[in-house]
Image (cartoon, rainbow, N blue to C red):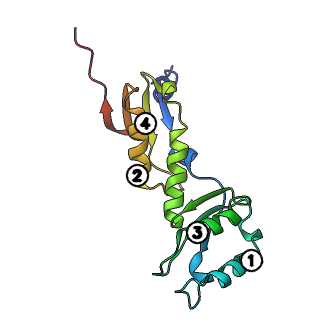
Amino acid sequence: MSEPFVNKVAESGLITLDPVNYYPRGETAVFDLKDHLFMQLILKEKDFREALKTLDWEPFRDKNVALTCSADAIIPVWAWMLAAGYLQPIARELFMGTAEELQRQLFLRNIDKIDAAEFTDQRVVIKGCGETPIPDFVYMELTKKLRPVVKSIMYGEPCSTVPVFKKPAASK
């Protein structure tokens, strides 16, 4: 008679944390001030105000919006404020910077919401493989968040992990 199959991974007490769960939700859009500058270089106040006033803002509704200027132009502070005044009521999130910087900030915000106390004295595997590419900084931020409370952190899959951190045994 053969011995019953035992799922050692399930019995190990490991908690798998999938970084994809903290991936920013929603579509991203970029609002580039360059498109509203004279010759894409010079801000003329009257023209700029009129351009923003008559712009169809609906394409930005419920999106994560990166407010940027890709031209090497001098943009007065009030211009950023004016654009933000139009975008903020309709955008899901509004951030000044590139689309990549926006994604980073949203990732960081999602990671910050983790209640680290839920992982106290746990053995955690931060999942390393998946269909969705995860930026390297996410793994570092998850490690920073969890290290103070966990028993150990590993990277990979529960069946094949790389040790990252192990809390030293308490001295007697």
Q: Mark 1 points at which residue?
A: 55
In front: label 1 or label 4: 1
Q: Marks 2 and 4: CB-CB under 8 Å?
A: no
Q: State left or right for residue 149 relative to residue 76.
A: left
* Residue type for callout 2: Phe
Q: Name the residue under label 4.
A: 145
Q: State left or right for residue 156 relative to residue 59.
A: left
* Residue type for callout 1: Leu
The image shows residue 172 at horizontal and vertical percentages of 22, 8
Q: Name the residue under label 2.
A: 137
Give how far apart the Cα atoms at labels 2 and 3 are: 33 Å
Counting residues from the N terminus, which is met first, the one under dot 2 or under dot 1? 1
Q: Name the residue under label 3.
A: 78
In front: label 2 or label 1: 1
The residue at the point 56 percent across, 91 percent down is 39
Secondary structure under the numbered disc 2 in the rendered image? helix
Direction left: furthest residue? 172
Q: Marks 2 and 3: CB-CB under 8 Å?
A: no
